Image (cartoon, helix red, strand yellow):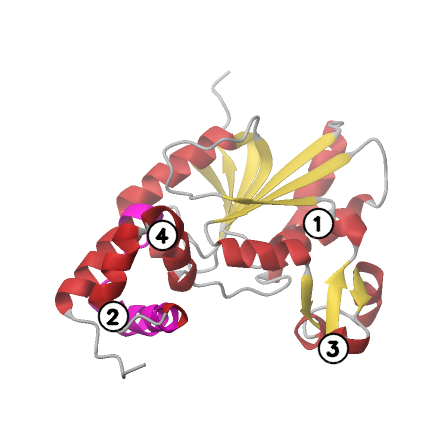
Amino acid sequence: MPQLNELDDNSFRRFREIIYEESGIKLNESKRALVQARLMKRLRELDIDTYRDYYDYLMDNYRDEIVNLINVITTNKTDFFREPKHFEYMSGEALPEFARSGKRNLKIWSAGCSTGEEPYSIAITAHRFFGDKKPLDVRILATDIDTQVLNRGKAGVYKAEDILEVVDVPTAKRYFQKGTGENEGLLRVKDFIRSMVHFRRLNLLDSSFPMKGVFDIIFCRNVIIYFDRESQKRLFENFHRYLAEDGYLFIGHSETLSGITDRFVFVRNTIYRKTPRTR
């Protein structure tokens, strides 16, 4: 395959318009090199020589190929128990409050779940607190626009070294199964934790979502930084609609709701609650 040239202005404009329309991710000029590098990977997979030829291929196979395009563009950096203060707050404040409420069904949404580290961290935190108490039912919905990371999340297999950087050995033994043979050096989330998490493809920029009912806690961390202000406003309107009264919203360490919405009450840095109805 010949050496690919730089992504030209017209092609960059076309691709970023499509990416914005489909995912809400806004890519300015500073992201051109990133887009070029990630598109190059897809072109090589398809043995296509130019970005213009790939654009034509995309138009001819839009329904199937748009998923692949979004997959290569999206950023999926995450770790177990990333931003640990959120999980400390969950176990120290939010979950005890839920336990006192007498409710029997706890629903949590991990929006922008990437490869699954976040929803599994949520599941482990909930299990540490509640144990196997019945009839309490904890269900975690994990959604992402990227089908590749969703498949990795469903598998629940990770490098042992990555997990042991943030999880102590007793916790690893309790919640992960050690790989052997060709899987040596890998850990798999145990079935009783994996069964708490349900993965599903979802575009957060859709006008409405197919889920029924509301969630007690929503995690949406380090996602809105890729959206423009109008997209952020629409997203948080939907989150407000899908969050239970007095439910919790966790956002990323570099994010804020200031200037975006006043529908949530500030609790502490990056933690909010839904504004209760006026009685």
The amino acid sitting under disc 2 is Arg
Residue located beneath label 4 in the image: 66
Q: Is residue 202 left or right of residue 7?
A: right
Is there any visible trace of residue 260 in the rendered image? no
Mark 1 neighbour density, 10 Å: few (under 14) some (14–19) many (20 or more): many
Q: Is residue 130 left or right of residue 71?
A: right
Of the residues tagged 4 and 1, which is closer to the observer?
Answer: 4
Q: Is residue 15 above or below residue 247?
A: below
Q: Secondary structure at mark 3?
A: loop
For mark 2, what is the residue? 32
SS under mark 2: helix
Tell me if I can see residue 29 in this picture. yes
| Kind of residue at disc 3 | Gly
Which numbered disc, 4 or 1, marks the residue that appears first in the sequence? 4
Magenta stretch, residue numbers? 21-44
Q: Are marks 1 and 3 in contact (CB under 8 Å)?
A: no
As drawn, 37 above or below 90:
below
Kindly give the residue lying farthest to the top in the view shown: 279
Q: Provide the residue designation for mark 3.
A: 185
For the residues labelled 4 and 3, the Cα–Cα distance comes to 34 Å
